[in-house]
Image (cartoon, rainbow, N blue to C red):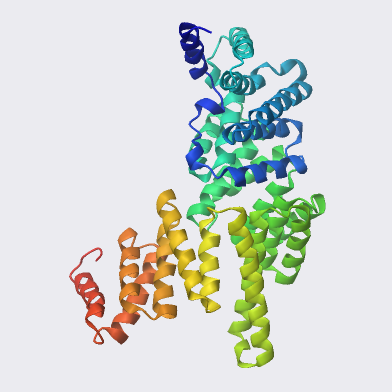
Amino acid sequence: MSSTEAAVVKDELNKLECYFTWDLEKEKLDLTDILNRLEGHVDFKRGGDAGLAQTYNSLGFVKYLLGSHEEALVFMQKSVELIKEYWDNNCDRWLIVPYGNLAWLQYHMKCFGECKGYLEKIKSIEQKFSDSALGLHHEVLGEKAWAFFKFSRKYYNQAKECFEKALELEPENAQWNCGYAFVLHRIETQFSTKPSLATIKQLRLALEANSDNDELKAILALKLAQSMEYDEGEKLMEEALEGSPNAPNVIRYVGKFLRDYGSVETSIALLKRALEKSPTSAFIHHQLGLCYKRKKNYLQSQGGQKSTRAAAEIQRLRSQCIYHLDKTTELRCGFIIAMNELAIQYSEDGKLDRAEELFQQALQIAKEKNESLQYVIRCYAEFHQYKRRSFPEAISYHMECLKIDKDSKDGKKSAKHLNKINDRWSSKSSGHGSAQRFFAKKEKGHAGP
């Protein structure tokens, strides 16, 4: 191919609507985690043939990013095959994205004839539906939304926007209603523990269109329980468990529901069963770690450390918690909340150097991702305050936490800790003058340190 021809082909490729043109940047993605999750979707055939086709398309792109072009080709071709089987004579617009992916992949594999062939197929579809541009078809918008949703929480807002546009064009579409419910749930979970009426309403709409989707039932059950509608939540959770007793994504939510609103023991049993089916699930290991933490905290609150037997049980539970959180961070290295919790558990176990190492890693990743930073800083400040007994460092990090947002939950906690330090230690050393200066400024009306 001449340089002129190559330039023309590249220009056509850049106009396509597909994963290669949607700014899914490799540097922002945890490819191992994405691969594990997508393979889990395939194993349990979640989403039916249409959803499975999208999953294979996503798998193909991940394999391309990992440099496995031949495997990428197999997965993308499988996606096309499933779309043709599922949609039969109405498959054309559903093929726009996978054909675009294949055109790009063939270009990178230097198979220019095949690349041009896929470009011709897309042109043919475009001419057949000349009433709108490729990127304005609800099939393309929906696929784009799912891609953003599956690949990283950094893209949740883009996924939300794409689902909204797709639903404007196809309001009754079951896939887009389901995806929109999922992304609203995830965004809400990131920023609030209190469910909104809008998210609950969308979950209900999605469930009406996807009545056999047990993951939707489980998520809605959790939201209802958080809104103190326990009876309906429990009924939905029972239905989800009965319908998908071995699906890790469902078991994960059932486990959380039981841990928070029922039996921790039952939650552990369910999660262990799910782990047998999906041993590489970071989320299931994380939930198990939190269950053991809950049991340990309860025993401690009952004064368990006063007896040798209870103290040994607390240590066993802490070890189990650490084991599962270790597995979580091993399987998903960028899981900041799990890494932060693991640091806390190691500090309680007296392994302060290991805790320090994990806190530093969590801080670095939180700064790089601009995610959960205030929470990690506040926990690190408490580590210095209560485990290291290093009050100048504790003051420094509590003040850093306040600078981010003094009115947030973490900001308010740091302010309380600074009050404690100021009351007890302000006169002990010059380093503690930082706390005095902070409170002096606060009294004068300053927003922060």
Which residue occupies the extreme left position in the image?
444
**Horizontally, is 212 left or right of 432 in the view?**
right
Of residues 200 and 290, the one nearer the viewer is 290
Residue 367, x across and y down, in percent: 40, 53
Of residues 265 and 11, the one nearer the viewer is 11
Report the residue at 52% width, 79% height from top.
350
Residue 120, x across and y down, in percent: 61, 9
**Is residue 229 visible to us here?**
no
Report the residue at 44% width, 53% height from top.
371
Of residues 238 and 437, the one nearer the viewer is 437
> Which quadrant: the C terminus?
bottom left
Residue 52 position by quadrant: top right
Report the residue at 46% width, 9% height from top.
3
Residue 116, compared with residue 194, is above or below; it is above
Residue 406 position by quadrant: bottom left
**Is residue 350 visible to us here?**
yes
Residue 53, x across and y down, in percent: 71, 30
**Horizontally, is 377 left or right of 222 in the view?**
left
